[in-house]
Amino acid sequence: MPTQLTEERIREVNTRYHDVAADGYDAKWGIDFGDVGQVQVLRKLRKLLGHELDQGFERSLEIGAGTGYFTLNMMRAGIAAEATCTDISPGMLKALQANAQRLGLKVRTVVAEAEALPFEDGTFDLVLGHAVLHHLPSLPRAFAEFHRVLRPGGRVVFAGEPSRLGDRIAAVPKRGALMLAPAWRRLVGARPTPVPRAGDHDHDHELERFVDVHAFEPGQLERHARLAGFRDIRVRGEELTANWFGWFNRALEASAEPADVPLLWRRYAFHGYLALQRLDEALLEPLLPPAIFYNLLLSARRP
């Protein structure tokens, strides 16, 4: 992960990349706001919150909310009554509001840095995020802010954070897919992804390799939470075989013109991923150390 960039440059790159990526973000990552997406979000939150999830939360704050995957699915399920979403990218929040309007949901959006949240102390019952901590340039300041804006007894939960070892392991299926991509495209009849033209702003998509600035060991996340004042801290791993399968197929698909990827292939990749998720959850996550999984999940409470 790149570490040579200044904090200011990290924020600038993240803003530019996510603004450009916003329009196609849901399609690229298979983000769903129907029954499947709701089940996925609630499954992750159940691992983090247990039976407390059933009580719901009056006021929630999502950090780096993107297009609204977690918050909007939570609202549809009745878990979040009053939701606020922040992101450093205005483009992402514009897409989030469009999704909310389409779903008939009302959500407050605020362009803000995680390290300087524009909210009063003790405002929220729940602070959450999905795949966001690894983008943040200053984790100590961010965790201090999460603690500040939570009421006493409030919960903080984060999912989808890459583990250091899991990220290295994931590179193996990615490399394998790149080697097999030309043969796979011939097999499914797909054209290669076109090379971006200079001056068409697609070059900002190349910033993707700079926006991820951390991969974590489980103890690092626990330490950031503890030093910020959180207690009842728990870090667990999520997705192993599903991750290998998913990254292999995603790398293949990324090499091809999206319109050329057959629907039958997409269904195979999607349902195979879901099946392996269930395998990981039932058999591997309870037995193996968190560090080996690609995703880390963090939950903690403000005393």
Image: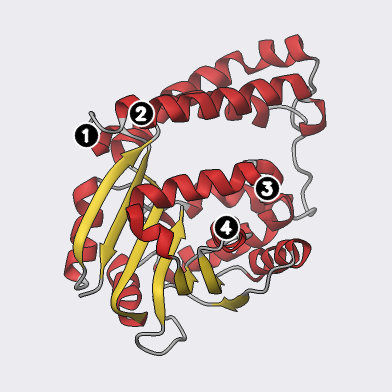
The residue to which callout 1 is attached is 289
Tell whether 170 sits left or right of 222. Answer: right
Question: Could you say where residue 200 lies in the image, as x and y percent from the top left?
Answer: 80, 53
Q: Amino acid at mark 2?
A: Ala
Judge by depth and name the residue closer to the eye, 54 or 42: 54
The residue to which callout 4 is attached is 77
Q: Amino acid at mark 1?
A: Pro
How far apart marks 1 and 2 lie (CA) works out to 14 Å
212 vs 84: above or below: above
How far apart marks 3 and 1 lie (CA) works out to 32 Å
Q: Earlier in the sequence, mark 3 or mark 1?
A: 3
Which label was assigned to residue 197?
Answer: none
Which label was assigned to residue 34?
Answer: 3
Question: Residue 233 is drawn in which quadrant?
Answer: bottom left
Which label was assigned to residue 282?
Answer: 2
Q: Earlier in the sequence, mark 4 or mark 2?
A: 4
Q: Amino acid at mark 4?
A: Ala
Number of other residues with Cα within 10 Å of mark 3, as a class: few under 14, some 14 to 19, many 20 or more: few
